[in-house]
């Protein structure tokens, strides 16, 4: 291995034909150039120049290195330009992992802001529920993870992650539009004890069962799905009703479905997570900042 500074100096010596000319071109002293060439020869373990009268001539090793210096310097220059673009937010890639309702609400608005402000920043989106999404960011498989938790649930947050609060998302119930309770502004969970239900993902289902137990009943769960569109279709078809976070109301696709706030009020907490060291990466910090800005505009915040 050798110092890239020595390669630049070597390239200039070959281009100008002497140590003194290279020194003038680079703004060095002639002894400084000589010392760098000796250091490069020492690193490589072989002479690169021989003296011929008052001039110098490349050895076979020197000629071999000359054939590569242009490529090396071009690669270093390209790397420097790319790093500079990333540091100045002209380029960069941020891998975001989000649960479905965040992917349908928070992410699109944040990406639209980024596209307008920093079109060189590329956001790659994958979908995953916690705790799997937290594991992915802890292992470096993604840069930012959006995850949620309910009151009383264990956090399960890896110690190396930094947490950024986004919002608190109230729970609502999805009812068919003709349901007798759909005319109310809010619905008590206990009033729905005799309904058939459609349950969601494992974490949401666990919170739902706990909430029902607190109200003194065990729900009749007709089916389970973690697909929000399937859940809406089942409610619209009268198969059952569902308890979902309010973010889901932002992309209700069925006119035959109505959302109402559930009492007693329960909120899930939505956070973004990233490795602490990644917070110093400009593009990652920028995406987190835009996610916070979007979350602040949401009703549940």
Image (cartoon, helix red, strand yellow):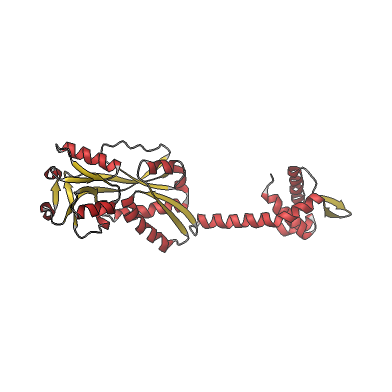
Image position, residue 17 (x, y; %)? 80, 58
- What is the residue that sits farthest to the left in this orientation? 180
- In this rendering, the answer to whether 296 lies above or below 223 is below
Q: Is residue 287 left or right of residue 221?
A: right
Q: Quadrant of the N terminus?
A: top right
In-front residue for pair 91/131: 131
Image position, residue 34 (x, y; %)? 77, 49
Q: Is residue 75 left or right of residue 100?
A: right
In-front residue for pair 96/129: 129
What is the quadrant of residue 132 in the picture?
Answer: top left
The residue sitting at 36% across, 40% down in the picture is 131
Say whether residue 27 is visible: no
Number of callouts: 0
Say whether residue 253 is visible: yes
Q: Is residue 216 left or right of residue 227?
A: left
Image position, residue 248 (x, y; %)? 26, 53
The residue sitting at 30% across, 54% down in the picture is 296
Q: Is residue 162 left or right of residue 257?
A: right
The residue sitting at 15% across, 57% down in the picture is 177
What is the quadrant of residue 232 in the picture?
Answer: bottom left
In-front residue for pair 109/209: 209
């Amino acid at each position: 291995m050798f110092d890239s500074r020595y390669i630049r100096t070597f390239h200039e010596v070959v281009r100008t034909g002497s140590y003194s000319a290279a020194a003038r071109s680079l703004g060095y002293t002639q002894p400084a150039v000589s010392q760098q060439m000796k250091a490069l020869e020492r690193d490589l373990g072989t002479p690169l120049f021989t003296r011929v009268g008052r001039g110098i001539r490349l050895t076979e090793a020197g000629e071999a290195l000359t054939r590569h210096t242009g490529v090396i310097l071009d690669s270093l220059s390209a790397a420097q330009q790319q790093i500079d673009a990333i540091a100045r937010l002209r380029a960069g890639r941020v891998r975001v992992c989000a649960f479905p309702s965040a992917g349908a609400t928070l992410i699109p608005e944040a990406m639209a802001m980024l596209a307008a402000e920093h079109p060189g920043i590329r956001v790659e989106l994958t979908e995953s529920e916690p705790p799997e999404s937290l594991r992915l960011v802890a292992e470096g498989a993604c840069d930012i993870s959006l995850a949620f938790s309910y009151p009383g649930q264990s956090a399960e947050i890896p110690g190396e992650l930094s947490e950024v609060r986004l919002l608190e998302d109230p729970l609502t119930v999805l009812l068919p539009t003709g349901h007798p309770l759909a005319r109310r502004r809010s619905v008590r969970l206990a009033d729905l004890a005799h309904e058939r239900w459609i349950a969601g993902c494992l974490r949401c289902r666990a919170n739902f069962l706990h909430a029902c137990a607190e109200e003194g009943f065990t729900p009749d769960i007709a089916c389970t799905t973690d697909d929000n569109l399937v859940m809406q279709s089942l409610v619209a078809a009268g198969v059952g009703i569902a308890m979902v976070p309010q973010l889901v109301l932002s992309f209700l696709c069925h006119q035959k479905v109505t959302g109402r706030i559930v009492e007693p009020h329960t909120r899930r907490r939505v956070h973004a997570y990233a490795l602490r060291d990644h917070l110093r990466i400009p593009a990652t910090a920028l995406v987190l900042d835009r996610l916070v800005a979007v979350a602040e505009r949401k009703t549940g915040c």
